[in-house]
Image: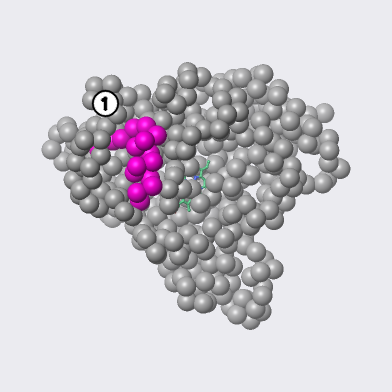
């Protein structure tokens, strides 16, 4: 359990900063104590669990045995009304509204919107340049996709920077004194709140003045505002859930795209096969015709490459739960109030589930994978609500990137760091040249 109160927090943070939570924190303890071990992190006694059985047990028992548990700074910055803080019926209610635009059908209309965002982005930020920062570029792109395509809110200058300042504080010590990271993040959150309240009230007026507008627009913000008008959701819940969605969506997806590109650069044969898949799709389209949902379904190999990259480099390595009752698990009692940390590594890097787990092998996804083995999007009632959006975002971006540009990594082995989410530490610069 380490030192009183502090426990092994320092070791955990150090491993996290190096993006080596598995190698430097989980694996040495798992080797010593087995698949389940206890420690103390950030003041809380915590049980770390590993493997598909543990994933199923803890993720599917959300609300019954455990509830999701975020640090105080995250809750204050995301807002106490966001979906991640809701339980039971309240969670189902918010999730229903959020999911309505994020299911496969709702997303069908999003495919052309995502295509034009990607095309526009490449024109503005890639055209005429020889080198770009891929991670910075995909961050800007995924940020504008979630705002403009999903929510229907125009991205204004400085918005991404405001959100980034909040993100810097989500795992900081929650000391609200001038000069601290948390203080800066809280100020940025207040600015965001003010901006969103103006947008929400304007949208409310528009919908009240022209009923039916929301269906025509078909964007998530309109759905949330209709819920607000009908009294199903409060204004504070709309604000907090918009903030949460933006965070949940943009850094995760941009890191996933960056890692797919890294893997493609390291595995030229996989890249050749993926490129062929996209060239075939491109040649079936007329000039200027955008992709459809059907086209994305043809990107089977690309999705295998993406899944394999995400298995090796999960944007979210796991998350904390809190026991709401004493839990009997594998012959141990986890006392009520203790934290439980499940990790993707526990099954993704496990020989029993993936042979030669450190090898990049997209073809392993030719075979179906058993439930709760592959969990980069979580599982159970809190499984990622944006899975489909993330998938389309990755597939569509790769389509345009590989069909329009030749590219290569400037630092093929660029280290990955984490603060609080993983990112390539030089921003992943790449050389680009338009395909002739
Ligand atoms: C590659 C990209 C992504 C990854 C790897 C990812 C991963 C995850 C994971 C692991 C969880 C579960 C966390 C837990 O159990 O504590 C989650 C939840 C969530 N994700 Fe994602 N996500 C991605 C993209 C997105 C996108 C694009 C959106 C939205 C537009 C989104 C929205 C959400 C929401 C709303 C939740 C909370 C669900 C709930 O509590 O019911 N995610 N995500």
Residue 294 position in % (x across, y down): 73, 45
- Rendered residue at 66%/69% (across/down): 215
* Placement of the N terminus among the 4 image quadrants: top left
Viewer-closest of 7 and 84: 84
Q: Residues within 10 Å of mark 1 (few under 14, many from 20)?
A: few
Q: Is residue 371 left or right of residue 320?
A: right
Which segment is the magenta one? Answer: 47-62
Q: Is residue 175 above or below residue 127?
A: below
The furthest residue to the bottom:
209
Secondary structure found at label 1: loop
Asked if residue 283 lies in the magenta stretch, the reply is no
Q: Please indicate, yes or no, whether residue 225 appears anywhere in the rendered image.
A: yes
Residue 383 position in % (x across, y down): 46, 48
Viewer-closest of 176 and 280: 280
Q: Is residue 88 above or below residue 41?
A: below
- Rendered residue at 80%/36% (across/down): 282
Q: Is residue 379 left or right of residue 14?
A: right
Residue 398 position in % (x across, y down): 67, 36
- Rendered residue at 54%/42% (across/down): 253
Residue 12 position in % (x across, y down): 29, 33
Residue on which disc 1 sits:
34
What is the quadrant of residue 183 in the picture?
bottom left
- Rendered residue at 65%/39% (across/down): 395
Q: Please indicate, yes or no, whether residue 192 appears anywhere in the rendered image.
A: no
In the image, the residue with mark 1 has its CB under 8 Å from the nearest atom of ligand 1: no
């Amino acid at each position: 359990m380490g030192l009183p109160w502090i426990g092994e927090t320092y070791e955990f943070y150090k491993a996290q900063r190096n993006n080596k939570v598995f190698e430097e924190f989980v694996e040495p303890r798992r080797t010593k104590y087995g698949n389940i071990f206890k420690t103390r992190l950030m003041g809380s006694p915590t049980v770390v669990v590993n493997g598909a059985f543990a994933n199923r047990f803890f993720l599917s028992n959300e609300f019954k045995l455990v509830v999701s548990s975020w640090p105080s700074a995250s809750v204050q910055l995301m807002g106490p009304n966001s979906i991640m803080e809701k339980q039971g019926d309240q969670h189902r209610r918010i999730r229903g509204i959020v999911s309505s635009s994020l299911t496969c059908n709702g997303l069908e209309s999003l495919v052309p919107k995502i295509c034009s965002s990607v095309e526009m982005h490449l024109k503005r930020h890639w055209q005429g340049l020889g080198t770009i920062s891929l991670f910075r570029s995909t961050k800007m792109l995924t940020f504008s996709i979630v705002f403009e395509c999903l929510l229907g809110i125009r991205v204004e200058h400085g918005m991404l920077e405001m959100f980034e300042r909040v993100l810097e504080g989500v795992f900081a010590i929650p000391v609200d004194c001038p000069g601290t990271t948390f203080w800066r993040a809280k100020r940025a959150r207040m600015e965001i709140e003010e901006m969103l309240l103006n947008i929400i009230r304007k949208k409310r007026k528009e919908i009240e003045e022209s009923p039916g507008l929301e269906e025509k627009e078909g964007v998530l913000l309109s759905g949330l505002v209709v819920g607000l008008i009908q009294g199903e959701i409060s204004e504070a819940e709309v604000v907090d859930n918009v903030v949460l969605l933006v965070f949940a969506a943009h850094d995760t997806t941009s890191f996933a795209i960056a890692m797919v590109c890294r893997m493609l650069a390291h595995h030229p044969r996989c890249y050749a096969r993926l490129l062929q898949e996209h060239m075939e799709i491109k040649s079936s389209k007329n000039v200027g015709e955008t992709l459809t949902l059907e086209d994305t379904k043809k990107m089977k190999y690309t999705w295998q490459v993406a899944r394999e990259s995400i298995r090796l480099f999960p944007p979210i390595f796991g998350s904390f739960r809190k026991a709401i009752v004493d839990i009997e698990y594998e012959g141990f009692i986890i006392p009520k109030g203790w934290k439980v940390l499940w990790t993707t590594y526990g099954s993704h890097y496990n020989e029993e589930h993936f042979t030669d787990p450190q090898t990049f092998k997209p073809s392993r996804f030719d075979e179906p994978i058993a439930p709760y083995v592959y969990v980069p999007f979580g599982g159970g009632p809190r499984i990622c609500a944006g899975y489909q959006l993330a998938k389309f975002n990755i597939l569509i971006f790769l389509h345009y990137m590989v069909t329009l540009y030749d590219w290569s990594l400037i630092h093929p082995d660029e280290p990955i760091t984490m603060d609080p989410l993983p990112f390539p530490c030089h921003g992943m610069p790449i050389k680009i040249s338009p395909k002739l």
